[in-house]
Image: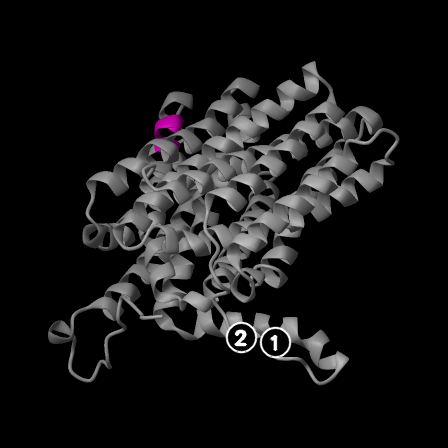
Amino acid sequence: MFRVREFRALWLSEILSVAGDRLALVALTVLVYDRTRSPLLAAVTYAAGYLPWVIGGLFLADLADRRPRRTVMVTCDVVRAVLVAAMALPGVPLWTLVALLFATTMFTPPFESARAAVTPDILPGERYALGAAVLQTTFLAAQVAGAVGGGVAAAFIGVRPSLAIDSATFVLSGLLIGLGTRARPAAARPETVQASPWARLASPWARLRDGFRLVFRDRALRTLLLIGWLVVFYTVPEGVAAPYAARLGRGPIATGLILASTVFATMIATPLFTRFVRARNRLAWMGPLAVLTCGTLVLTALRPGLVVSLVIFTLSAAFGVYQIAANTAFVVRVPRDRRAQAMGIANVGVVVGQGGAFLAAGAAAEVIAPAAVIAIAGAAGAVAALVLTLGWRHMSQPPGRRRPGAGNPVPLRRSS
């Protein structure tokens, strides 16, 4: 993958952007807590780094279809660099800092959608799956590095210098994209001039409606999307990591190990899966692995100790490599001129679903044991994965093996 010059630029920009996002979020959360000593306000600040994903993912992601994708990425980096630089200025009021963080994060979904949409153009065919695996592994590693770096930087050099560093990462990312990738025309046709201001105002909602129709009216796309959204079930251990560790009589170190086990397993398993399993076999294994990644968590109902729990969480996360197959099949089926918007909708579903799942798991853990909460989430996810897997196999079955009268098979590829 790294022999491709454009991919190298994309990969380096991903490291800088994601690590910078985490660094700013952690540093600003620390600043808010130091000023207010309020856990609630610190949590609100942290949430301000996630909520904009919903707005940006729904209404801004399709910019990468209607505008040249390199231009979208560079513009997002420039805007984020300016906003974060403003956060680093002395004397900025607290709520202004939170508002600036909100605005900064809102430009992340169109950047990520543009990056995801342009990657198949840079890496066609089987190379795309390998490149997606590298980028996903990089994304996870950069998140960890950015979170750790944010805490260290806030402790040793201060919050405002940390924000200045974050601003610089966006500048470097924009330069890498602008100089390291070639210009490509917009994938979608330019919009025509609207007849009235009301029509212009309604246009984003119309595009959003069309995007949901595209994804959910196609049975194969809908199934692949829902298989990807199973992540909301098997990441529940992250949401109750602290109470789970406390029930085992352990402290913050155990909590950190639980969180690290899921990220580490994904980082290791993803490149191995794409490197040693052929594309056709990856798609065949997608369903069984989706069932296993959720079903493995049911073992926590046995109330295992910390070591066995870490093994369970690691295995569950490792089975989650099926996401590479689901992602690749989803991207292949989406028309090129709608790819960024479709990826934006998929990302929004993950963010909203995980947020809701974490809240529900936390509320349930107030009443029942965290181990039971995880087991229930795993069982529910496994059932959903089994139903989706059976539906996918029915759709992708060759014509000669289908039951008479079952309808035409859904093709695994769509030209665009």
**Magenta stretch containing residue 74, yes or no?**
no
Residue positioned most to the left: 400
Q: In which quadrant of the rendered view does residue 20 lie? A: top right
Q: Amino acid at mark 1?
A: Ala
Residue 264 percent across, percent down from the top left: 40, 29
Q: Secondary structure at mark 2?
A: helix
Q: Secondary structure at mark 1?
A: helix
Pick the residue in front: 247 or 242: 242
Magenta range is 309-314
Task: State the residue position of label 2.
Answer: 210
- For this view, does 306 lie left or right of residue 176? left
Q: Is residue 336 above or below residue 380?
A: below
- For this view, does 191 lie left or right of residue 127? right
Res. 206 mark:
1
Q: Residue at x 31, y 54 (%)?
A: 124
Packing grade of label 1 (10 A; few <14, some 14-19, many >=20) is few
Packing grade of label 2 (10 A; few <14, some 14-19, many >=20) is some
**Magenta stretch containing residue 312, yes or no?**
yes
Q: Residue at x 40, y 23 (%)?
A: 305
Residue 188 percent across, percent down from the top left: 50, 70
Q: Main secondary structure of the magenta part?
A: helix
Q: Is residue 279 above or below residue 154?
A: below
Q: Is residue 356 above or below residue 415?
A: above
Res. 397 mark:
none
